[in-house]
Amino acid sequence: MSRESTVQISRRSNDDEAIEVINVSDGSEGDDETEDVVIGSDSEDGDSSSKNQLCLMENPDDHSSEDESEVRLNPHVEFEAYIKSLNTNMENLNKKLKAQILLTDKWEARSKQNDALIVELSDKNAQNEHLVQYLMKENEKFLEQSVISDNKQKAKLSEISDKLSIKEKEYNDIHTKFSALSEEKEVLLGHIKKVETMLLKRGQTDQTIFLNKPKEFKAYNVREGLGFENPHYLKRAIRFVPTLYDTIYFNLDKKYRMRFTRSSEEVEAEHDKRRKQKDNVQIPFNYERLNDSYSRREISLSDEEFKQFKSDDSPVDNSKFYEFRYYKTLKDLDDERRMNSSEKDQMLCKISDLHKQVYKLKGELQKFSISSSSVHKNSNTSETSFVCASPASEDSVKSENALQLSTILYVACVQLKNFEQLLILERNSFEKEIKVFEENILDLSSKISDLAIKMDLERQQFQLVRKSSEEKSLELRNQIVALQNQISDERNQFKKKEQVLKSEKKALEQMFVAHKKEPIVETDVEKQKEFFQCEIKRLTHQLAEFSTKAMTSMVNDNKKFDSSRSFNWDGILKFVSEFYGGRGGCSKLIVLLHVYKGKQ
């Protein structure tokens, strides 16, 4: 078992004495013991240093003996125990302090997090307020736009309804016109049928007369004797030759006799044969004319431009000529660029012609080279058919022809290059125009798609409006049906009330009859008269009220009041006159009934 020890130290200091008391208590489960330690110091001699005495005393309550025994303990042991207890307490306190420090650190971290969260919440609240304001503004804008769109839709609906009403009116007008025209058509068809029947009857009469008429007998066919099985062929032959088979021209002079001609097909066939024969004939080539043309040909160039070519000894310099032709071609190209689009086709044709001319010139050059070589080889023989000139003239002709051909070829090449450049430029421009056209087409297609979407939306809106109008019309119809049912119920109630009144009338009539059969005492006659007068007044008032209600209900329903439902005033008057006729005193009642009948 554990044992606890407590030490109590008390000090008292005076001028004469100094006493220290240490109380030590050892506690266990069984018993409690306390020990007092007294440390005393006597300062009788006046010494500065005093001796400490430790007195250990036991508790006198635990011992029965009267003698007190003093026990002295080691002070160092107790002091060490005290120090150990203090150390343990200090350690516990340090642990508690560390735990509290950790808790404070955690609390500070959490407080920092809470501050950050508070800042974030404040920011979010500000953002939410801003968003709420923005959404409120957008909601207001949306409401304004919705109101505007609703107004527009209402305007469109009004326009559509107006158009529909106009179209319905037009349809009704057309329907009326169509009905009138159909009636007129039926009338005209009937008239035509009548006329056709008259004509048929007349034709039948003419046919019967023609059949009954006697006819001449013809035993043979004249057309078969002429050799034509089908009369159509005879008509065709007479159309080509009017005098054919005409007996008027048989016995006349030679001038007027028949002339049998060939058909156009045979003549065309002969012409084709002759043409083929002419085409098959091969004509030999005349080389003499060709040589003469080369020797006598003149160059179509001015003397001012080409003075150097006249002198045979001067050196040949074609730079100026080519420069002149180059500038001239540039001018021609400028002029050609300014041409309209209608002239481009002509220029393309010219290009093709120039290509052909180039190929021809190349062929002529080859022929010229071949012919010149043949002339040099066969100049002394007699087999050649060429007319050979002197060597000087031949050289001049060759040089002139070569220059002419070179100039023509150069010009043709330059023109071809320029035309090719023009074609490239035109192609590029055409491609650009095609791109622009395609972009325009895409824009138009996008616009068309947008319009189609808008049309679909408008159709959907129109369908929704139409459905709403149909629903409204159904509601109105249902309301009308309900009103009709109410009117029918009121009519049934009216009929029931009328039957009740009729039954009451019959009961009164029976009562009148019963009173009529019974013997009437003179004293009770006046009472009965008064009673019956009151009953008649009551019934008349009821009938008047009932008739007014019925009339008002029928007027509200825009219907007439049936005469069969009116009250039988004549029967009442007869009954009253018969019942009170012999007794008198009922004239006022009869007059009142007549007056009320007149009012009704």
Image (cartoon, helix red, strand yellow):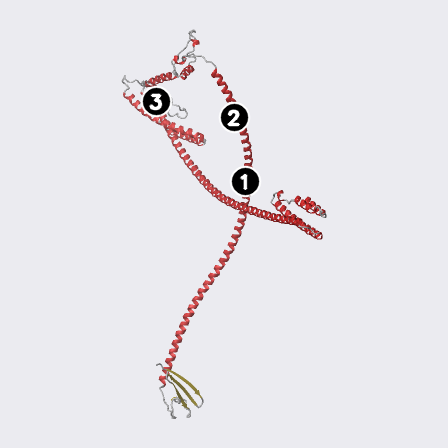
What amino acid is found at the position of numbered circle 2 in the picture? Lys
Residue 22 position within the rendered picture, expressed as x and y whole percent measured from the top left: 40, 86
Q: Where is residue 154? Give x, y as percent.
A: 55, 45
Closer mark to the observer between disc 3 and disc 2: 2
Quick check: 390 left or right of 186?
left
Name the amino acid type tagged 1: Leu
Query: Foreground mark, 1 or 3?
Result: 1
Tell me the quarter of the picture where residue 435 sits.
top left
> Which label sits on residue 193?
2
Establish if 226 lies above or below 411: above
Question: In which quarter of the view is residue 565 placed?
Answer: top right
Which numbered mark, 2 or 1, is in the foreground of this view?
Answer: 2
Which quarter of the figure is the C terminus placed in? top right
Residue 345 visible somewhere in the drawing? yes
Secondary element type, mark 3: helix
Task: Give the CA separation, mark 3 to mark 2.
Answer: 99 Å
Residue at the image position 32 percent from the left and 21 percent from the top: 394
Estimate the spatial distance between the alpha carbons at disc 2 and disc 1, rounded to whole Å: 42 Å
Helix, strand or loop for disc 1: helix
**Marked residue nearer the N-terminal end (1 or 3):** 1
Alpha carbons under labels 1 and 3: distance apart: 95 Å
| Quadrant in the picture for the N terminus | bottom left
552, 242: nearer the viewer: 552
Amino acid residing under circle 3: Val
Q: Position of residue 20 (x, y in %)?
A: 41, 87
Which residue has dot 1 on it?
164
Residue matched to label 3: 397
